[in-house]
Amino acid sequence: MRKGMDETMPAPPPKRVSPMVAEVRYALHLLTLNKLVLAGIGLAVGLTLLAIIGPFFVPANTPNAINFQLGSQSELGNPNIGWAHPLGVDTYGRDTLSLIILALGLDMGAAGLVVGIGLVVGVLLGVTAGYIGGKIGEAIMRITDIFLALPLFIWALAIAAVLTRSLNSLIIALATVSWPGYTRIIRGQVLVEKGKPYVEGLQAVGVARWRIMLRHVVPNSIFPLLVQATLDIGGVILTLAALTFLGVGLTPLVPELGQMVSNGTTYIQIDPALITIPGLFIVAISLSFNLVGDGLRDVLDPRLRR
Amino acid sequence: MGQATEEVLSKKDNQARPVLDIKGLMVDFTTYAGVVKALDGVILDVKKGEALGLVGESGCGKSVTAATIEGLLPDNAHVVGGEVLLGEDDLLKKSKSDMRKIRVNDVAIVFQDPMTFLNPVLTIGTQLTEVIDMEEGIVDKEALKVLEEEGKPKPPTTGGNASGKPWKPTRSLRKKALRRLATQALSKVGLPDPDRIFDEYPHELSGGMRQRCMIAMAIARNPVLFIADEITTALDVTMQAQILDLLRALRRDFESSILIITHDLGVVASICDKVSVMYAGSVVETADIREIFANPLHPYTQGLLKAVPKVMGEKELDSIPGSVPDLIYPPAGCRFHPRCQYAWDLCAKEKPPHIETAPRHWVECHLYKEMKTSG
Amino acid sequence: MADEEFLQVKDLRKWFPITGGILGRTRAHVKAVNDITFSIRRGETFGLVGESGSGKSTVGRCILRLLDPTSGSVMLDGVDIANLKPKKLKPFRRKMQIVFQDPYASLDPRQTVKGALVEAMRSSGAVADAEAATRAAKELIQRVGLNEDHLNRFPHEFSGGQRQRIAVARALATNPEFVVLDEPTSFLDVSVQAQILNLLKALQKDLKLTYLFISHNLSVVEHMSDRIGVMYLGKIMEIGNKKVVYRYPKHPYTNALLNAIPIPDPTVPRVPAMLIGDVPSALNPPSGCVFSTRCSYVKQICHDKEPPLREVAEDQFSACHFSEEFSFETVISKVQQAETKRGNAAGAPSSSG
């Protein structure tokens, strides 16, 4: 036997990819195994595309194109409403399909912003609480607990009611109630990562604390958070629609799904389509993102992994 | 004892027939990354009363072999060839329910980590008595003994009681009898204060004590084969010494055949009669314990023995260059040939046959083709 | 080899508080390291052995200030680094490094090998700029037995042994003088272990390193160390030259420990286990001598008075009241003598195993 230090690489090694890419590929493979999840992904992608591309085909002033005469004939199956309005018109005479397309963009964009802000704030606070800990960490977690102790919807309602009526107020209100969940999740993940030897190794080598936090710990702990965020988009849409339905936050002409349902409640007996069509889209967005989030969560499940 | 055990022991010519005989076992695993050809023709046997050490490094397939014997392979595993004979029965052909019975009665296995094996919400006593109670009649016999010792009248053993049914002990009598049997088993494995341990939960005991409880549960049914899968790996040296003493004592008293799976050559040297060395899915060498240390034939065995620090003040350790092969793309021919200093072109083409080079010494290596003693 | 005391640990203590109740009051302490004193000479390998719960890994971490000691001092080249404020500690961080036990968890899975090495070099100030760092990284990776194209790969693409090589390279990236090896080969196969141990020995010679080798594997420690220290339940039981301690220990625990090693040689007679029972909890160590509850030579004084660590033979220290009365000879000694006799009888020089 050769007294040597040499060691050959096992053959043949798989194509060199970064762990993130390899993980994403594997995750996609696992996702395709569940038909329901696939359907959800398809729907979510479809709706997102519609929300992004659709507005280019819709006349920009649609929200304000009021035509009461047309609107008064909006009841279901009225032959006066031609195929120019495939989904009919609302009580203000505006084309429902165009409104839906604009509303999709507004709702999904708002939800994305809410979740995005929540993530940023949540991650910053959670990482600080987890990595630095001590009194600061305790303080952060106690505030988080306070927010989580009350039903989020009540919080959001209260905040939105106090602020001026606008989409921005709604977004702020919802973002304020979404960060605590993320803080808690990522703090837990950070604590787990902190205990791993590679963090000790980095400390031993003298790497600065903030660098360890941001460049090493966060990327390794962020995946469960992204799963939760995806699930949350569905929830935020629902909450947003509920808030606007209650009349908190927006004015009647704004193309927003909850608002459209709210507008249609008065005519529920004459033209249920005014409610059901926007309602269906709310369900569609919510359900599809829920399925995607569910699928992602399954991907994380260690039992299903390689 | 189970049916398979009785068959093994009842045949008069059983002295020669091994208790466990694995012939050319081949097992594949289907994974996302590809098909892992984990076992590539494993050949080994354990005779009655013998202790066989199965030695190898990670990935060699020793745990897969144990799992196959026990019928505990995961769903993505497929047996693609070979036989696993327990006495005369091929375990591979048994149904799942048959294997369950065999696992209980004939082949006991003890693992490295007792915490995953023992139920954390049940006391040791509950779990042990559950195993003991599986044997018919044993509790009744003990119950009678209890009555006798307490001076109470013995029930009629024939003819039944007043209603014509055969006598069955009361619940409290059963409990007493089971408790006695269990505490006897616990003291047999060297646990002090078995009465107290009977009522304790697994997490209240230390690692070594839990390991002893597992052994007690395993031998409670007098299995014909006892498999110990890396049971001392997680233990401290002093605790390991105690467990090894226990195994040696049990061997003396019970004549069980033992299959000891480990990567530690020191453990093997201290307790085994025979050793089988595994590498990348096959058994590359089998010999008696003294023979294999004194006269290792396979280049891998030689390398392994030279790489182990022997507390003899050696200056440098010989290492085997390279590393264990990827079993999704294993080397062709002999799986060890990329790391072997004696390899030549035949080694890359053909898997070497299992040759007996001397009485009770088998090697799988092309170097020894000329030395075949038996046809 | 200069005999200077390079690292001196004196009365080192690390007690972990156990808090309880709503107010989080400290109810008790886990006395993981309890008044440890020993020293390491420049250029030597000091082996620290002990079973689980002995506190040996905690000692390593305290020396490196990955944990802050509860009390005591650690003198490195004359400076007490145990009590330095973090800012002052930075230049000393460079001098001492650590290689961990678990090759799979000791590297950031999302960082390339090159990234890890360069980051280590730049954070410690060992190199001036990016170019110098890349050059140094190439040199370093070859020194540990891998080659340049391994630099751009990720940890999961390597085997356990290769990952440990990378961990060693990362430790060497800061040009340290002292390396703590915390069970570096416990998770590795025997043949890979041999490669890594050979590598460590070669590096020690080439780079003039001082090692603290922490392990529960007594055969590996015997192979690697010059002197050894035996720990039990947070205290040191014995310190001495390896050759002497492994053959003629002066402490009953050392004797029991060494006789329990399963030697890979079937001709060696088996010694029945000398120690029964389990290690007591570090929450409530026995009074007097911590080993008194399991010692076969225990007397009343062992429960009453804690034996100090004192010199009981030349350069051999033991924490036992009766060390001078013992003349233990381990089974290892007997086997080595038999081996030498065999070698002499055969006329050939005695083989090195």
Image (cartoon, rainbow, N blue to C red):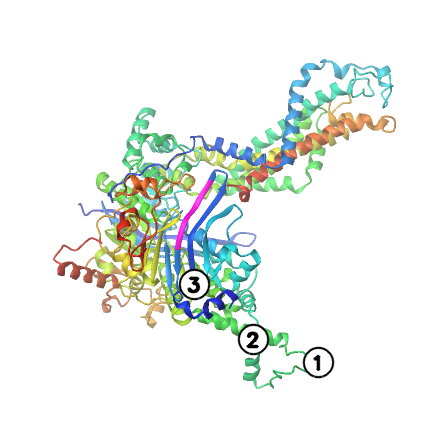
Please name the residue that numbered disc 1 is placed on: B163
Labels 3 & 2 near each other (Cβ < 8 A): no
Please name the residue that numbered disc 2 is placed on: B177
Question: Would residue C311 be counted in the magenta stretch?
Answer: no
Residue in the image at 57% along x and 86% along y:
B151
In this rendering, position of residue B369 left or right of residue A207: left
Mark 3 or mark 2, which is nearer to you? 3
Residue in the image at 33% along x and 25% along y:
C129
Instruction: Check the residue under mark 2 and report the chain it is in.
Output: B
Instruction: Say the numbered circle drawn on residue B19.
Output: 3
Q: Position of residue C293 (x, y in %)?
A: 38, 67
Whichever of callouts 1 and 3 sits on the residue coming sooner in the sequence is 3
The stretch in magenta equals: B35-43
Mark 2 Cα-neighbour bin, 10 Å: few <14, some 14–19, many ≥20: many
In this rendering, position of residue C145 left or right of residue B111: left
Whichever of callouts 2 and 1 sits on the residue coming sooner in the sequence is 1
Residue in the image at 45% along x and 44% along y:
A195
The quarter holding residue C147 reads top left
Labels 2 & 1 near each other (Cβ < 8 A): no
